Amino acid sequence: MWDYSEKVKDHFFNPKNAGAVSEANAIGEVGSISCGDALRLTLKVDEQSEVIEDAGFQTFGCGSAIASSSVLTEIIKGKTLEEALNVSNQDIAAELDGLPPEKMHCSVMGREALQAAVANYRGEEWKDDHEEGALICKCFAVDEPMIEEMVWANKLRTVEDVTNFTKAGGGCAACHEDIENILEKVLKERGESFDPTAVAETPAAAAPETPKAPLTNLQRIKKIEQVLEALRPQLMADGGDVELVEVDGNTVYVNMTGACSGCQMAAMTIAGIQQRLMEEMGEFLKVVPASEMEKLHTIGA
Amino acid sequence: MSDIYLDNNATTRVDPLVVKEMLPYFTEQFGNPSSIHKFADGVARGIKKARKQVQELIGAEHDSEIIFTSCGTESDSTAILSALKAQPNRKEIITTSVEHPAILSLCEYLEKDGYTIHRMPVDKAGRLNIEAYQSMLSDKVAIVSVMWANNETGTIFPVEQMAEMAHEAGIMFHTDAVQAVGKIPMMLKDTKIDMLSISGHKLHAPKGIGVLYLRRGARYRPLLRGGHQERGRRAGTENTASIVGLGKACELAMEHIEFENTQVKAMRDRLERGIIEQVPHSFATGDLNKRLPNTTDIAFEYIEGEAILMLLNKAGIAASSGSACTSGSLEPSHVMRAMDIPYTAAHGTIRFSLSRYNTMQEIDEVIKVVPGIVENLRKLSPYWDGDKPVADPEQAFQPTYA
């Protein structure tokens, strides 16, 4: 079964604010196509201050859907509508000490229920703006519609292109067959055919040159910087960034900043960076968050 | 009360007698059965005995019709790919929409290579339409592959009759019988079944051992080529300890087959009745008149399966579910979808699968626990109000799906 955090289990076994709020004046009802789960969020909003005085949920769904609903109601109680709207699905997942990648859509459903409830309070019609589908890349949580859209929009032709644009396939590489299948399908729709030997068109990291002599320390660090530089656009697309702090033997210390910091996907992102660094540098490297640096040094001393 | 294991269609506990039989093959009789020295001289005999024990359980005519493989999936793949390879002019496969992924995923893959796959639908009780099947049989079909019993509902398909029909039409017949072997009696020599898959861990043998039954004379092309093991039909050094274990497990299954169809069935029936009588808006799925004796699949409407499983697990009860969330896939089980079970029920299906190790006391404990779990989850459900579903549930709650 899923590796749920203690917090997820706690919110599932002892849900907070279950049931509908009486005299609710904001109701959001959303469902997730990807698993059939659905959630009704009821809020009682003070009309003067727009503070959420009470929140309740009713959920048809799995353990993490119920836990996400429960924690959402706890987060937003006492917040104004404007403050509540700033709550992201990552905030919901973080409050639960993370969710498995396959279950992130439960937190998305929570956030959407909130948006729908606020729209309902304001007399607006809420419309969903994203599509969900089968999870292809489990390392970076990228799903099929996302890859398809990028393949269409950017005329991608190779797995490497897809990785450069979406990160999908940049980790353990187990999903490359699935990505090829998507490419095959979209290219066919576009009247082309998929060529597995085609060379990626998108500027990936500069092609690895086989060094004639061993790199000097400075050259090596510069090269690591180059690789990180090439990865940066993907991270920035998600509102994050990476910073090289120190290189010590085979260990590369980095700081994950922006949206990457504190994101439960950071660990996986780091694994992806490590993979890429090893490929480009042609040597074994370990990527570690800089926060671990002191700890390790203390142990080593 | 200690934990209650009702997930035997997923896998079973290895019988202690099986373990005992296996142990010498790790440290004493560890030689390669092909070697000629005293570390190996008992091994070939052990394998021979196991082959006999498997033969006995499934009623095969010859023991050489038993080919040991690594698992049910390998047996399935070998059977289908062999039929295609041996008959290159036949480009069609007939199967059902409720097969195990070991068959369905392979077929989907073959479809891309230009093969035509006919997936027979089932009705609301999970049954096939035999007239429709008859009309599909043609000389373009390389193989028919139909499971003997369904892993989720336990529904039994009339494979003996279907094999006769295929044979009449000159078509090979394979059955994935991993759920049926050891639970219901069979006598393969009286049938026209050409190939049959067995999985050891479904009948109290270890994981990582399987069998492909191959009728003598059936045209065959191995999947794994290499050494002469299994008469050249499945290369690779024999998994001797597990083969011996599977043999013992087959012998024990044979001894208990009556118990399975009387006592185990009685426990299953009591469990099913006990739950459905107490829990409103719950029902058993599949063909209730033609079912494995150990399986019941109950749909609890308006709640979701994984949530039920987590609460069952907390109460020390192990079962499984056809809901989407437990598998990490997008859809509730393809079996539930094929039977046209509505979403709000398909997501809440729980499969209880028993074994000869269960007891009536355990069953009574489960009957006691389940209604409370369902009630608690329904309190959280937007489709539920008090002690009944909201009036016109599909209308009352219409979320915007994203």
Image (tube, coloured by chain):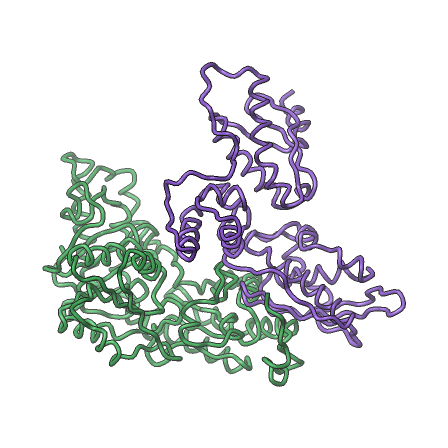
Chain colours: A purple, B green
Q: Quadrant of residue B269?
A: bottom left
Which residue is found at the position 54% from the left and 38% from the top?
Answer: A272
* Closer to us: A1 or B218: B218
* Closer to us: B262 or B7: B7
What is the x, y in percent for residue A157? 44, 46
What is the x, y in percent for residue B228? 15, 43
Residue placed furthest toward the front: A191
Which residue is found at the position 51% from the left and 64% from the top?
Answer: B317
In the image: residue B10, left or right of residue A164: left
Residue placed furthest toward the bottom: B391
Q: Quadrant of residue B281?
A: bottom right
> Where does the C terminus of chain B fall, quadrant-wise?
bottom right
Residue placed furthest toward the left: B217
In the image: residue B27, left or right of residue A9: left
Residue placed furthest toward the right: A48
What is the x, y in percent for residue A66? 64, 64
In the image: residue A62, left or right of residue B52: right
* Closer to us: A10 or A263: A263
Residue B260 vs A221, above or below: the answer is below
Which residue is found at the position 42% from the left and 68% from the top?
Answer: B334
Q: Quadrant of residue B380?
A: bottom right
What is the x, y in percent for residue A278? 50, 30
The count of marks equals 0
Residue B32 vs B14, above or below: the answer is above
Residue A119 vs A281, above or below: the answer is below
